[in-house]
Image (tube, rainbow, N blue to C red):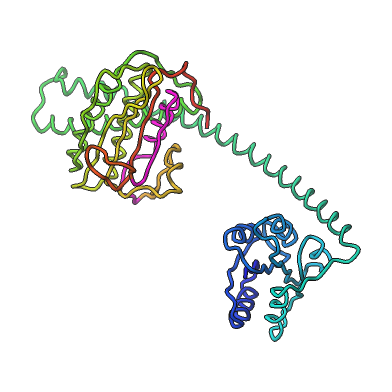
Amino acid sequence: MLHIEDDPSNRLLVRKLLVAAGHEVVDATTGLDGVRLAATAHPDLVLVDINLPHLDGYEVTLRLRGMPDLAGVPIVAVTAEGDRQTSLAVGADGFIAKPIEAATFARTVERFLRGHRERADETGEHRLRERAEKIVARLERKLGELKEANTRLEEMARLRREFLQNMTHELATPLTPVVGYLHLLLSEELGPLTPLQRRGLTSVEASTNRLRELIDTLLDVSALENGQMHFYVRDYDFGKLAARAIDDARAAATNGQVTLEAEAIPTGLDAVGDPDKLRRAMAHVLDNALKFTPRGKHVGVGVRVLGKGANASFAFVVADDGPGVAPDQIARILEPFYQVDGSPTRSHGGVGLGLAFAHRVVLAHAGSLDVQSPPAEPVAGRTLVGTAVTLRVERRPPPATPPPKR
């Protein structure tokens, strides 16, 4: 039996009475939860309160009566505030007033299981029409509230895009002289360096390069969200691009004590697009896999050719031995700034932009970024247990159309 009731003391009482009579009871605390649970639990009987949050008991009854799987399932209103004739008019089969008579409640409910039904009187049609008018009025109010909320969200999204754009430019401006003077110092154009000074400046340069890469990615994501990113179209070799991205990632793999294994990368994969942005997209996918793979584990990389001729597409596949991604998180990890673990104490760095950037780049190349967890097939000769990300682009995409704003 499904009991839809927001008051915990009433839920407890009904459960005790029905379980003692040999029935199994599942509870829902809101009208929406009750409708969802009814669709999955397929109860033999539904007990519903009238005064419920989200959807009231009348609306829940109307919704349940419209579900084919619940045809013939008795619905009984158990309430202190509802009206018997209105409850019957909207589709309930019975009405039990609160407070519940503990001595007879279970027997009363069992009568409905055996086929007992109550009928609305001659006012039923009028009450049903009256209830429908109230539902329409409520929907109109809700639509107005949703429209206002949507307008506010659109304004907040616009302000976020402007803030992101302005902030990244403000960060990039002071970084330019820092990079320039570091180059002058390391090249000893401003005087000779001691070995200790060189080690210190090299460390500063590495951190500065990381900061510059992050700012570049922020600028790119900001431009993509504002529809202002320019994609340059020229010929390139997808295989050579992939090989370069893999070579660039080997140092990070070594530092993280992760084994990066690549299949034999084919060449001669002539394509048209923006190779610079595609290489950076590949780098982000590789960096993500290396970041989440524990020490001593493996990351596999391969290139796939799908189809033939001008209609062919090329795929860059990266699989890892990391913890994997829950099914309900797969779509969200492609959103800017989203991280499965966004807490300050998370064990992995980054701000959640790499896969979002890669996703938008491949969309601009009429491709896709697909995530599987765990990987469906071996990569580089290994069956890995974490996540596989497949970056696919068309060999000759149609004229570049920027991805839709988000």
| Image x and y of residue 221, in percent | 43, 29
| Left or right: where 63 falls relative to 399 | right
Q: Is residue 372 magenta?
A: yes
Given the current orientation, which residue lies at the most extreme right position?
Answer: 122
Q: Quadrant of the N terminus?
A: bottom right
**Residue at the location (81% across, 53% down)?**
132
Magenta run includes residue 347: yes
Question: Against 283, is 85 above or below?
Answer: below
Number of numbered discs overlaid on the protein picture: 0
Q: Nearer the viewer, residue 125 or 180?
A: 125
Furthest toward the top, the residue is 234
Q: Quadrant of residue 213?
A: top left
Q: Residue at x 69, y 84 (%)?
A: 102
x, y percent for residue 284: 32, 33
Tell me the quarter of the picture where residue 199 sits.
top left
> Residue at horizontal 27%, vertical 41%?
378
Left or right side of 46 for 233: left
Q: Position of residue 225 (x, y in %)?
A: 49, 28
**Residues drawn in magenta:** 345-374
- Judging depth in this view, the residue of 86 and 249 nearest the camera is 86
